[in-house]
Amino acid sequence: MTPMFDGANMFGKEFVDTSVKSFASLSQAAQAIVAETSDYTRRSYEAGAATLEQLAAARSLETAFEIQTDYARKAYEGFVAESAKLSSLYADMAKEAYKPFESMVAKPK
């Protein structure tokens, strides 16, 4: 083969290898995100069910308002914390997916 085709062939092979590495890191990060989201959903459902039980057992309207207020505060705090955790996971996923391509981008042509 000519040197031009050899270079193109080598670049193509390197690009495919790098893409496979990037896909592997994306897959791992996606699994972590799914696991975290599933865990948050389970915790949220359990907290909601427990609050509903407490509301059913409340003897006064004032107690019911306190239970609901406490639930709303905890749900909001949990959502904010989970959002921060997920944004960190997504940022890490992007960094890890790009990492294999850094060497290709930094190479002189």
Image (spheres, rainbow, N blue to C red):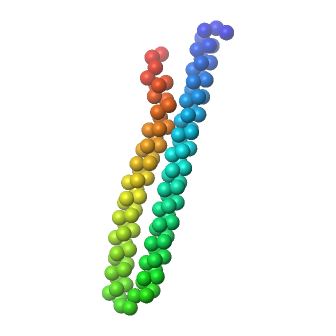
* 56 relative to 73, above or below: below
Q: Is residue 79 left or right of residue 2?
A: left
Point out the image quarter for the N terminus: top right
Q: Residue furthest top?
A: 2
Q: Residue furthest right?
A: 1
Q: Residue at x 58, y 14 (%)?
A: 7
Query: Which corner quadrant of the image does residue 61 belong to?
Result: bottom left
User: How many numbered dots are placed on residues in this image?
Assistant: 0
Q: Is residue 89 left or right of residue 16?
A: left
Q: Residue furthest bottom?
A: 59
Q: Residue at x 60, y 23 (%)?
A: 12
- The image shows residue 39 at horizontal and vertical percentages of 50, 61
Q: Residue at x 55, y 30 (%)?
A: 18
* 88 relative to 64, above or below: above
* 58 relative to 101, above or below: below
* 2 relative to 64, above or below: above
Q: Residue at x 43, y 23 (%)?
A: 106
- The image shows residue 55 at horizontal and vertical percentages of 42, 83
Query: Which corner quadrant of the image does residue 70 belong to?
Result: bottom left
- The image shows residue 35 at horizontal and vertical percentages of 52, 55
- The image shows residue 2 at horizontal and vertical percentages of 64, 8
